Image (cartoon, rainbow, N blue to C red):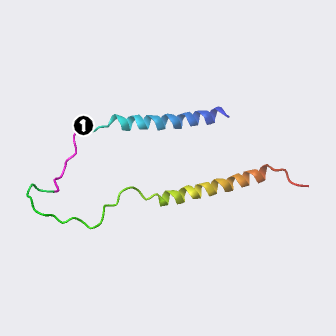
Amino acid sequence: MSPKKLLVGAGIAAAFLSGGAVAASDYPPDEPSATTVLSSSEGGATERPSTLASTGSDSGSLVVIAGGAVVAGAGLLVVARRRRQPAAS
């Protein structure tokens, strides 16, 4: 491996690790966030929504992107192997 590639890789790793340290230094925030009271202390009956809140994430788009990356990588491997094989004479 060339020294240039090692230097670039080390720079990327250092940038990645220092970014995490900067983000961690700001946690927890100094001031608490403002809160909003959504209910009152009065004892009235409240209507509840008939459906549950949507929680979690929709990972369908990430699966499509990852699948495209895998297909593109496989295609690049096929092209690279064909270029390496000597031409049949």
Q: Position of residue 27 (x, y in %)?
A: 31, 37
So how many labels did they put on this image?
1
The disc labelled 1 sits on which kind of residue?
Answer: Asp
Question: Which quadrant: the N terminus?
Answer: top right
Q: Position of residue 88 (x, y in %)?
A: 88, 55
Q: Residue at x 53, y 35 (%)?
A: 11
Q: Nearer the viewer, residue 15 or 57?
A: 57
Asked whether, in this view, residue 21 is left or right of residue 69, the answer is: left
Asked whether, in this view, residue 45 is left or right of residue 86, the answer is: left
SS at mark 1?
loop
- Residue 6, relative to residue 63: is it above or below? above
Asked if the stretch drawn in magenta spans residue 59, the answer is no
- Residue 66, relative to residue 17: is it above or below? below
- Residue 38, relative to residue 33: is it above or below? below
SS majority, magenta: loop
Question: Which quadrant: the C terminus?
Answer: bottom right
Q: Which residue is mark 1?
A: 30
Asked whether, in this view, residue 9 is left or right of residue 32, the answer is: right
Q: Residue at x 8, y 57 (%)?
A: 42
Q: Residue at x 58, y 33 (%)?
A: 7
Q: Position of residue 6 (x, y in %)?
A: 61, 33
- Residue 29: quadrant of the picture: top left
Q: Nearer the viewer, residue 52 or 86?
A: 52
Q: Residues within 10 Å of mark 1 (few under 14, many from 20)?
A: few
Q: Residue at x 62, y 36 (%)?
A: 5
Question: Residue extending furthest bottom?
Answer: 50
Q: Position of residue 66 (x, y in %)?
A: 55, 55
Span colored in magenta? 31-38
- Residue 68: quadrant of the picture: bottom right
Asked if the stretch drawn in magenta spans residue 37, the answer is yes
